[in-house]
Amino acid sequence: MESQVRYNDTLLDHYRNPRNVGDIPDTPAVAQVGDAGTGDVLKLSLLIEEDMVKEARFKSFGCTAAIAAGSMITTMIRGRSVAEAALITNADVARALGGLPDSKLHCSVLAEQAIREALRLYRDSRTTRAKEMSCR
């Protein structure tokens, strides 16, 4: 039960004052991971220009740790290159949050999955665009 889980000040700050909430319109780098039927969902939107993450926004349906992980991941990847963003792991997210209880580690995994999927969709859109340009 979540009411029995103890959270640190960093995690609680990201939960109570989430950073970068919302969507980024017209970007192909939008990933939604998780399962609302069984737990937490995290949606991550990235604006990538010249292989740099210029903006990151999130929406989350879930527990305190899921919201905090969404907030933290957006602060971690803004201003990084696509290659640097791809190296961020769930352990990095958990560490940045000051640690997570074992029962909430899946929330940091959602953040890592969202990054991977958003970057994959970004790369796929670039490949598609390149193919379209070469057919002209």
Image (tube, helix red, strand yellow):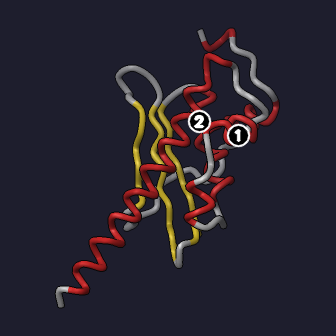
Q: In the image, what residue occupies the spot 61% across and 67% down?
A: 81
Callout 1: helix, strand or loop? helix
Q: Earlier in the sequence, mark 1 or mark 2?
A: 1
Q: Residue at x 82, y 31 (%)?
A: 9
Q: What's the amino acid at mark 1?
A: His
From what the image shows, is residue 51 above or below residue 117? below
The quarter of the picture where residue 35 lies is: top left
Residue 70: x and y in percent read 58, 42
* Residue drawn at 69 percent across, 35 percent down: 94
Specify whether 87 is left or right of 124.
Answer: right
Element under disc 2: helix
Give the labeled residue for mark 2: 67
Q: Which residue is mark 1?
A: 14
Residue 47: x, y in percent?
50, 67
Image quarter where the N terminus lies is top right
The answer for how far apart the CA atoms under marks 1 and 2 are is 7 Å
Does 136 sit left or right of 61 as displayed?
left
Q: Residue at x 51, y 36 (%)?
A: 110
